[in-house]
Amino acid sequence: MKVVIRKIIKIDEALCDGCGNCVLACPENAIEIIGGKAKVVRESLCDGLGACIGNCPTGALSMEEREAEEFDELAAKAAVESAHRARSPGQSMGCEDEGGPGEGEGSCPMALRGKGAGRLGSSKLAGRQNRAPASEPAAAAIQPELSNWPVQMRLAHVDSPSFDGARLLIAGDCTAFASPRIHQDFIRGRTTLIGCPKLDERESFVERLAAILAAHNVEDITVLEMEVPCCSNLEAFVRQAMRRAGKEVPVMSVILGIDGEVQG
């Protein structure tokens, strides 16, 4: 396996309490709980994007740049698929979040927890490809409600008057594709900013939002996240930006399922 200088997850075992949240949040199945502590079981399965970091309640996770095995996307996908195939149809998942004992505390792979793309895609989106196109009257009833541009956080103009007294919507950029009601239910009456907690660089995201909050009196913020683990850091980004800006703004967090339904 090729070794390169890259970013990879670092786990402070002295701070780790073995809760397993990071295992749940890792889409590549790179982390397991071994001997009561979280460990990266294979460097090539860790993509170094840090989807797990915001889920650690003790601050045991961080990023470091060092020599490590190169990320192997195919191997990561194969590892998840292999774990899924290892169970026969109808067999109990044996996962703590499924109501039964774990296979080893916190060791249940992401693809078997009902929160990975494989299970969600097969169960919640089945049959959509064969759905007939919406009728013209139904399509016409959906009107765009976007009132500002640009919407990407990294492109937003800090001094834009659209932020003055605004009700902000800060949404994961996948949310617009999950539900046809995004404009009516969330964008209407709000100034919209979008980003991806997994693919956007955290510091630049937080710094830009903090500058916006410091320069304008924002009325409130709605954070719209997808139910998938890689989106779960979005609210943490927002709250970090508020602290940096020295502003207290009411925040409401909404989680959207990939089936387009609001969770909880």
Image (cartoon, grey):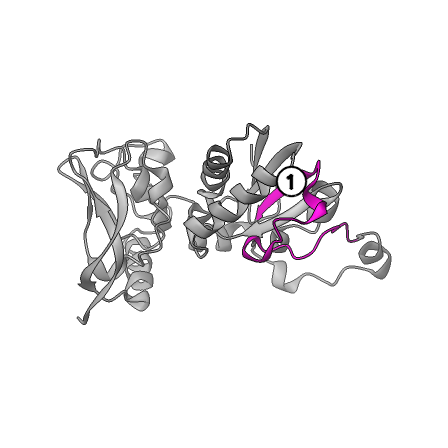
Residue 202 position in % (x across, y down)? 42, 49
Q: Residue placed at 53% from the left, 52% from the top?
A: 195
Judging depth in this view, the residue of 5 and 127 nearest the camera is 5
Residue 237 location (% of width, % of height)? 46, 42
Side of 232 where 63 appears, left or right = left
Q: Position of residue 240 (x, y in %)?
A: 45, 37
Task: Please identify the quarter of the rendering in which residue 131 is found.
Answer: bottom right
| Disc 1 target residue | 168
Q: Which region shows up in magenta?
A: 144-171
Give, as a three-letter code, the residue at label 1: Leu
| Residue farthest left in this picture | 35
Residue 256 visible in the picture: no
Q: Nearer the viewer, residue 94 or 16?
A: 16
**Quick check: 252 above or below 202?**
above
Q: Is residue 36 left or right of residue 225?
A: left
Instruction: Answer few, some or many: residues within 10 Å of disc 1's Cα (few below 14, many 20 plus, some between 14 and 19).
Output: many
Q: Is residue 107 left or right of residue 81?
A: left
The residue under the point 57% across, 31% down is: 251
Q: Residue at x 19, y 59 (%)?
A: 66
User: Is 83 included in the stretch rendered in magenta?
Assistant: no
Q: Nearer the viewer, residue 162 or 11?
A: 162
Quadrant in which residue 61 is drawn: top left
Quarter the N terminus occupies: bottom left
Depth check, front residue: 115 or 39 = 39
